[in-house]
Amino acid sequence: MRITIIALIIVVVGGSIFAAFGYFTNQELGDIAELPEIKSQYEKLENYKIELEKINQNNQKILTDLESQITNSDDENLAKINEEIEVIKRVINENKKELEQVIEKLSEMESDQ
């Protein structure tokens, strides 16, 4: 059970890092007058926002599962579960900040069109 939780945490953190890395390395800032490229960037940001929301929902589910394990756990596993919860909470907060930045960028792009 513990290995499964650790694996899920690693997958979520890895996916978040991979998504963020891909997003920041694939940004192409060209001539603003080129409408198709702006639309393409907008669509990429929109897709990225959707993926971040999915990751955040998955993280929330993991957090809920971990919190339910606390209520059903004995004292020796409690410290480990609390550590895992703190990691997930940090990942969720980082994803929320990144999601806010993406939403802000999307609204800026939308207002420029």
Image: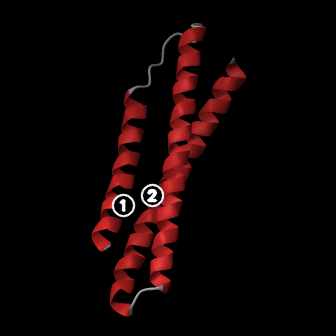
Tell me the kind of residue under disc 1.
Ile
Quadrant of res 22: top left
Q: Position of residue 55 (x, y in %)?
A: 48, 49
Choose between 102 and 50: the one closer to the eye: 50
Quadrant of res 10: bottom left
What residue is disc 2 on?
91
Left or right relative to 7: residue 28: right
What residue is disc 1 on?
9
In the displayed structure, 27 sits above or below 13; it is above
Q: Position of residue 102 (x, y in %)?
A: 56, 38
In the displayed structure, 88 sits above or below 79; it is above
Q: CA distance from mark 1 to mark 2?
A: 9 Å
In the displayed structure, 100 sits above or below 90; it is above
Residue at point 40%, 26% (across, down): 26
Label 1: which secondary element: helix
Residue at point 55%, 38% (across, down): 49
Q: Residues within 10 Å of mark 1 (few under 14, many from 20)?
A: many
Tell me the kind of residue under disc 2.
Val
What's the colour scheme? secondary structure
Q: Going from the N terminus, do you reach mark 1 or mark 2 first?
A: 1
Q: Position of residue 35 (x, y in %)?
A: 60, 9
Left or right relative to 109: residue 76: left
Is residue 89 in view from this perspective? no
Residue at point 50%, 76% (across, down): 67
